Image: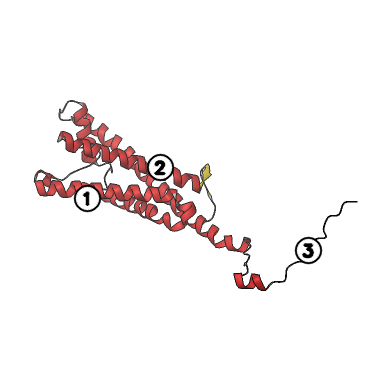
Amino acid sequence: MSGTRSLCCHVNTATRASAIFYLIFNLLVAVDLAVGIIREKDPITVSYTEMKRTHGNCVFEMSTNFISLALMSFSSVMVMMSHRKGPMCVMPFAMFMFLDVGLSLLSLFDARFGLPGTPTYGDALRLASNLKGGIKLNGEELNQATLIFGVLFVMYILLKVYMFQVSVRYYYALKEQRRSAPKNSVVAKLPSYDEALKMKPEATLPKYQEP
């Protein structure tokens, strides 16, 4: 984890930019989810199972998604306080990035594994069908949708891997900075009140006399 630069900027800047992007993205997903609840329609950014039609499963999945979004957003906010609070504030964000990458890969097999906002193949086909007015895609259109989804999904995974990498490097950079800080600082111990009373007063300056 040597080095404090990532691509064209410092890991501090890269991690903070990643946290801001992640926070805005989670807020947009939360808005999309809330609009879907109000309009009683499927949200664009969140996938549901076929069991969602039952009221109990619908409430459970909605609650789980909102809690996940709140925790992911809170991890982004903690990154902003890491410079003052210490490197441990970066760990939740890095853990969510690692978890996001792993669950995103598992979502290729089952969309239920993905975190809120994770692109899925089913969502890509549903969006492509909605753009055509709900008409079923033919063979050529299905191949185009599959290709576009594949490219976007790979870019999504690479972005999350990069965010995980810079956050871990930023954690070690802050840890190293905290470790070397006491060596360069000077600590002065002030006398107590009783010790100050026992100290001899310094010699007074001679009084000023006019010539």
**Direction from residue 189 to residue 172 in the image, left or right:** left
Q: Residue 129: where, in percent of width, then height?
A: 19, 30
Marks 1 & 2, CB-CB < 8 Å contact: no
Q: Secondary structure at mark 2?
A: helix
Residue picked out by circle 1 = 64
Give the image location of residue 97, x and y in percent. Answer: 36, 51
Q: CA distance from mark 1 to mark 2?
A: 23 Å
Q: Which mark is residue 20?
A: 2
Q: CA distance from mark 2 to mark 3?
A: 60 Å
| Cβ atoms at labels 1 and 3 below 8 Å apart | no
Q: Residue at x 44, y 48 (%)?
A: 80
Seen in the picture, residue 167 relative to 39 is either above or below; the reply is below
In depth, the one of 160 and 67 nearer the eye is 67
Q: Which residue is tagged 3? A: 204
144 or 108: nearer the viewer: 108
Q: Nearer the viewer, mark 1 or mark 3?
A: 3
- Asked whether disc 2 touches disc 3, contact meaning CB atoms under 8 Å apart, the reply is no
Q: Which mark is residue 169?
A: none
- Amino acid at pointer 1: Thr
Specify which label sits upstream in the sequence, 1 or 3. Answer: 1
Q: Is residue 95 visible?
A: yes
Nearer to me, 165 or 206: 206
Residue at horizontal 35%, vertical 49%? Answer: 74
What is the three-letter code of the residue carrying label 2?
A: Ile
Spatial distance from mark 1 to mark 3, Cα to Cα?
Answer: 74 Å
Residue at point 36% right, 43% down?
23
- Using a 10 Å C-alpha cutoff, classify the residue at mark 3 as few (fewer than 14 neighbours), some (14 to 19) or many (20 or more): few
The percent position of residue 58, horizontal first and vertical second, equals 14, 46
> Which residue occupies the extreme right position in the image?
211
Where residue 168 sits in the image (x, y, percent)? 44, 54
